[in-house]
Image (tube, rainbow, N blue to C red):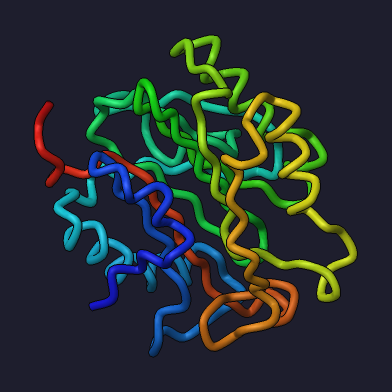
Amino acid sequence: MSTYSPEYLNVLNAYPENFARFITRIPGIATTTDRNAVIAALTPAHEAVLTEGGIEPKMLRRAQQVHGNKVALVGDIGCSYPVEGVDALFCGGKADCCLGIYVADCAAVWIYDTVGQSRALIHSGKAGTQQNIVGETLKSMYKVLGVQAADCIAVISPCIRPPHYEVDIVTMIKQELEEAGIAPQNIHDCGLDTAADLETFYSYRVEKGNTGRMLALFGRNPQAPEE
């Protein structure tokens, strides 16, 4: 099985405590316009990637993803999932949970605090980006966990881009990350367009809604050596 650990995530996985993955199109899974049905069909393959990494699927934490800018702190125990009304999740560095965000043209954004090891995973499509979801996430991380943006690195996933989409959400996301305090050299864009490669990715726009969902994952690597 592929580990779904592409090169653009090396900047995160270079830290042994990190488990960062991006699960792309799963061969053999029929697509549908029913989001819940297609996610149910994809779940066994998605859970297999977690299990391969030593993470119990029950530790996956997901957001409802309503194209807003609300953020939630999650952990090893707590509320039911997906967390209602939010598009971004973050957790402390010692949490054993794994954050998960579904995308099919929108961007997933990983944020890692290299000092405290806190993690965030964000669903940033057109609407969320226009509402500065990444800035709101960094604000919440600072308020709740004392995370300094200057200590963070960010990675932007494959997503739809011009000329296949009229809005350049990646440029907006980069600008918002910088305005929040992340240094430009610590912002990493994979540069990949979901609409340009349907063999690898799902694209809601190109497939006119009859599509699947990719899954971004970010958690603590259970195989990392103890400090």
Residue sitting farthest toward the front: 185
- Furthest toward the right, the residue is 166
The quadrant in which the N terminus is found is: bottom left
Number of numbered tags placed on the structure image: 0
Apparent side of residue 167 relative to residue 186 in the rendered image (left or right): right
| Image height of 161 relative to 67, above or below | below
Q: Is residue 64 left or right of residue 100?
A: right
User: In this picture, is 177 found above or below 78?
Assistant: below
Q: Residue at x 61, y 42 (%)?
A: 185
Q: Nearer the viewer, residue 28 or 200?
A: 200
Q: Residue at x 61, y 44 (%)?
A: 187
Q: Residue at x 51, y 82 (%)?
A: 200
Q: Quadrant of residue 145?
A: top left
Measured from the top left, where is residue 218 in percent x and y? 38, 46
Residue at image x 67%, y 39%? 184
Q: Position of residue 47 (x, y in %)?
A: 26, 61
Q: Position of residue 205 (x, y in %)?
A: 74, 74
Quarter of the image where the C terminus is located: top left
